[in-house]
Image (cartoon, rainbow, N blue to C red):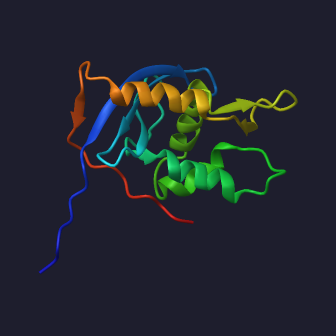
């Protein structure tokens, strides 16, 4: 008999909007955490016509993807594609737009389609405050995605 393992629910800490990287649509995204305090992201709506995945992706998995690139190479949305294997090509770009909105990446001056990673101190401080808050705690019943390894 196949054993089923359940993963913890995600507590939604923040719901916000941001423009897509193209600026043609507005994305609504969520930041959440699991019981182990693993920070998660997901896009939940898009005002444009592009398809995307609504699965949760752990911040640690995103940072692993960033760390695996050559240090002299910029961050581009395709770097995040392996996190959504078999999913829409829009999803990595939408996630990158969320990371930009949250101050975790910034476009390069000479090429605005390429990004650099920013220090995460301010983001982490904000998330820590949200985690400590008891105001309107929400739990999402859908299960988080498994961390994908490269």
Residue 48 vs residue 135, the one in the foreground = 135
Closer to us: 12 or 86: 12
In the depicted view, which residue is nearer to us: 39 or 112?
39
User: Quick check: 71 above or below 27?
Assistant: below
Residue at 20 percent across and 41 percent down: it is 141
Can you see residue 29?
Answer: no
Q: Residue at x 83, y 32 (%)?
A: 111
Q: Left or right? Give the position of 131 relative to 117.
A: left
Give the image location of residue 30, x and y in percent.
39, 30
Q: Residue at the spot x=59%, y=36% of the render?
A: 96
149 on left or right of 115: left
Where's the C terminus, which quadrant? bottom right
**Quadrant of res 67:** bottom right
Residue 119 at x, y percent in the picture: 67, 35
Q: Residue 76 is drawn in which quadrant? A: top right
**In this picture, is 35 found above or below 146?**
above
Residue 129 in sight from this viewpoint: yes
| Residue plotted at (51% across, 28% down) | 125
Quadrant the N terminus occupies: bottom left
**Residue 23 percent coordinates (x, y):** 61, 20
Q: Position of residue 77 (x, y in %)?
A: 64, 43
The answer to which of 95 and 88 lies nearer the viewer is 95
Residue, far right: 110
């Amino acid at each position: 008999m196949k054993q089923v393992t359940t993963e913890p629910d995600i507590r939604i800490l923040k719901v916000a909007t941001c423009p897509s990287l193209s600026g043609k649509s507005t994305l609504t995204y969520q930041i959440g955490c699991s019981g182990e305090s693993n920070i998660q992201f997901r896009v939940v709506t898009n005002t444009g016509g592009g398809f995307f995945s609504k699965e949760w992706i752990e911040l640690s998995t995103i940072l692993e993807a960033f760390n695996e690139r050559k240090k002299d190479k910029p961050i581009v949305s395709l770097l995040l594609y392996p996190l959504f294997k078999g999913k829409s090509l829009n999803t990595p770009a939408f996630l990158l737009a969320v990371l930009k909105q949250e101050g975790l990446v910034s476009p390069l001056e000479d090429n605005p389609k390429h990004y650099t990673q920013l220090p995460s101190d301010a983001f982490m401080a904000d998330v820590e405050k949200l985690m400590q808050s008891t105001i309107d705690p929400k739990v999402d019943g859908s299960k988080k995605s498994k961390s994908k390894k490269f």
